[in-house]
Image (cartoon, rainbow, N blue to C red):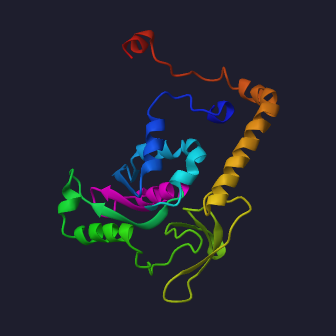
Amino acid sequence: MCLIKNKCPLKDDLDLVIDAFAQADAFIVAAPTYCLGANAALKLLADRILFFYSRNAEIWGKPAVGVGVAGIEGKEGSTKLQIDSFMTLFQMQIKASEILYGAMPGEAALEDANKPLISGLANALLNDPVKDAAPGCPLCGGDTFRFYENNRVRCMLCSNEGKVDTSGSFPVFHIGTSSHELLLTQQDALSHGQWLQQMKHKFGEDKTKLKQVTRQYADMGSWIRPSEKTRDRA
């Protein structure tokens, strides 16, 4: 709907958030871990990224650090990946990202093990970070991969494929770009936005044919709908 009407149909505070992004000097992207992943509020905002494009010159390229908090050590799941993805989608200059452990509000800041990580994030945001020696994607710096047969891998941050060499002490990832990049550079993001606009026009041309497909399923099964009483309470 947003691509069709060129504006968001939801009546909320998105414009306030966009203004805050434009005025910010830097970003700290933080999210708690819910069910082995970042809290859904992060994804809700990321899914509306198109409305930030009109002010990309005011938003993109600013320094950022990411921090996820998990209540149980080792049970952060995909939280760090989702935070890194958010910062990459918004073309932030990622200085560092970490996972802290602490179950109760504020507990993570009290744990001795977390204090050097917190100091490191602050220093990274204000200065040039120390280069991470851990193996990662040579294109985007991602550290989460899906492994396939014959040493094929896919980076879960930029979604590009390549090979992994495990002959040395550490794995070395050889990842190549694709024909349709989304986020590696600001130009990639702009080109993807233009592609989405092309898809909008294509939908306008094909919507009659597409409706014929969806109508086949309109009366199948039972739709779950709120009762009149529930709707009145809402």
Residue 72 colored magenta?
yes
Pick the front one: 3 or 127: 127
> Is 6 left or right of 106, judged from the image as shown?
right
Residue that appears at 36% across and 14% down: 233
> Is 53 left or right of 35, judged from the image as shown?
right
Residue 40 position in % (x across, y down)? 42, 44
Residue 92 position in % (x across, y down)? 50, 59
Residue 83 colored magenta?
yes
Pick the front one: 152 or 176: 176
Pick the front one: 21 or 152: 21
Residue that appears at 23% across and 68% down: 115
> Is 127 left or right of 111, judged from the image as shown?
right
Locate residue 112: give its quadrant: bottom left
> Is 228 left or right of 208, judged from the image as shown?
left
Q: How many numbered marks appear?
A: 0
| The C terminus: image quadrant | top left
187 in relation to 163, above or below: above
Locate residue 203: give its quadrant: top right
126 in relation to 8, above or below: below
128 in relation to 27, above or below: below
36 in relation to 14, above or below: below
Residue that appears at 43% across and 14% down: 231
Residue 173 position in % (x across, y down)? 58, 77
| The N terminus: image quadrant | top right
Q: Which residues fall within the magenta stretch?
A: 64-90
In the displayed image of the protein, which residue is found farthest to the bottom? 168
Residue 99 position in % (x across, y down)? 34, 63
